[in-house]
Image (spheres, rainbow, N blue to C red):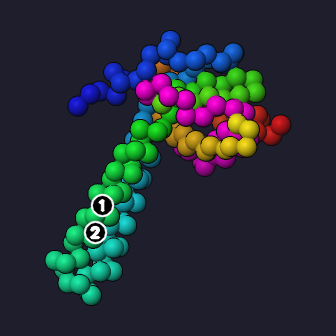
Amino acid sequence: MIPTDETAAAPEQLPQLQSPVGRISLRPSLALQLLVAAGLGVATAAVYTALAPWLGAWRALPPAWALLATGGLAAAAWRRRQPAFLEIGPDSLAAYARNGACLATGRLAGASQWGTWLLALVVEHGARRKVLLIAADAFPAATCPPGAFHTLAVRARSAAGR
């Protein structure tokens, strides 16, 4: 298995915004991945429980496994589309994937914060809107200053209020 840090695109290779804040490096959120896995497990158990009385225990397993496999593939694709780098400018935000692809760029149109652990950012570019979910555990303690998640949340709420 390739360590996550080795697969991240080098920050020098990404396009530069004129940002006074600089680039924030993110890691994959363990909390969000566990929530997706738990939801997938509950959905698989629900399908099996619903089909087992009609089809029998053995004949209900293939549809449940098919749901688990499809959901697992969708979760893996979702994980690859999560931001690895954020760049916040005075009127804009840019999010980049680990391979350097631009996930979202534009102005912040909205922000919502759930407690101290999850932030949803709405990035608007023309008529298109993209929602980014950023968990507090995605900010590595080694590279991000303390309170980086709170600072991002405050800046996002103030930028979205314009």
Q: Is residue 108 visible?
A: no
Tell me the residue that label 1 is attached to: 68
Left or right, residue 20 beside residue 102: right
Q: CA distance from mark 1 to mark 2?
A: 6 Å
The residue drawn where x is 34% and y is 50% is: 73
Secondary element type, mark 1: helix
Left or right, residue 112 beside residue 101: right
Magenta run includes residue 113: yes
Left or right, residue 24 beside residue 17: left
Q: Quadrant of the N terminus?
A: top left
Tell me the residue that label 2 is attached to: 64
Determine whether 104 is above or below 71 in the image. Answer: above
Amino acid type, residue under disc 1 in the picture: Leu
Secondary element type, mark 2: helix
Dominant SS type (magenta): strand
Mark 1: give few (<14), some (14-19) or many (20+) Cα within 10 Å: many
Task: Find residue 93 and report its horizontal and vertical position in percent.
Answer: 66, 29
**Label drawn at residue 99:** none
The residue drawn where x is 39% and y is 51% is: 74
Q: Bounds of the magenta span?
A: 98-124
Q: Is residue 89 visible?
A: yes
Magenta run includes residue 90: no
Q: Which quadrant would residue 150 be assigned to in this image? A: top right
Mark 2: give few (<14), some (14-19) or many (20+) Cα within 10 Å: many
Task: Find residue 14 and report its horizontal and vertical position in percent.
Answer: 53, 18
Amino acid type, residue under disc 2 in the picture: Ala
Task: Find residue 54 and report its horizontal and vertical position in percent.
Answer: 27, 87
30 or 44, which is in the foreground?
A: 44
